[in-house]
Amino acid sequence: MSRSLYQIGDREYQRNMKSESRKVSQITLLSLLLGLVLLLIFLGLGPLSERLGSAPIWFIFYWTIVFVLAFLLPAFAIHSLAMAHHLHRKRLRELDKELAVAAEDVRTLLNSQKTNSSDSKKSVR
């Protein structure tokens, strides 16, 4: 009924690889989005300001895009925190289950040792 250490270790390794991959992709996405927003703000205030000022439609369109992207940054950050919290809670539940299995194995082992020690005492008498 109990799992071998190899199975537990393999599953743990796969979980860590998924978690690391997810972290790297989230950090990359947030970094690229932040860089894009900063670049768009810089361009809108500098080189593109004359062109955007001469065409009100493009001005509104450009700054709406910048505004939406800027508000996506905290949304992604909050989502990332929520996912980290969810994964943490899930891992705690899994650890509780593994601990319960290990405790049951220890109880079984202790009971078998008690039985063996009481059998050996009876055989000595």
Image: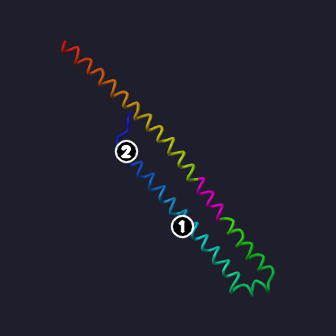
Residue 7 quadrant: top left
Q: Is residue 112 magenta?
A: no
Which one is closest to the eye, mark 2 or mark 1? 1
x and y percentages locating residue 72 in the rendered image: 67, 65
Q: At 48% across and 42% down in the image, what residue appears?
A: 94
Q: Check residue 51 in the rendering and tell me which mark sits there, or answer none.
A: none
Q: CA distance from mark 2 to mark 1?
A: 32 Å
Instruction: Give the mark nearest the N terminus, 2 or 1.
Output: 2
Q: Is residue 1 left or right of residue 78?
A: left
- Say which residue appears at 70% left-offset and 82% top-offset: 45
Residue 116 vertical placement versus 25 (above, below): above
The majority secondary structure of the magenta stretch comes to helix
Disc 2 crowd, CA 10 A, few/some/many (<14, 14-19, 20+): few
Q: Where is the C terminus found, in terms of image quarters?
A: top left
Asked if marks 2 and 1 touch (Cβ < 8 Å), the reply is no
User: Which residue is painted at 44% across and 54% down in the image?
Assistant: 16
Numbered disc 2: secondary structure? helix
In the image, the segment drawn in magenta is 73-82
Which residue is under mark 2? 7
The location of residue 8, given as percent across then percent down, is 39, 44
Q: Is residue 44 above or below residue 89?
A: below
**Residue on which disc 1 sits:** 28
Q: Is residue 13 left or right of residue 56?
A: left
Query: What residue do we see at 35% from left, 40% from top?
Result: 4
Q: Amino acid at mark 1?
A: Thr
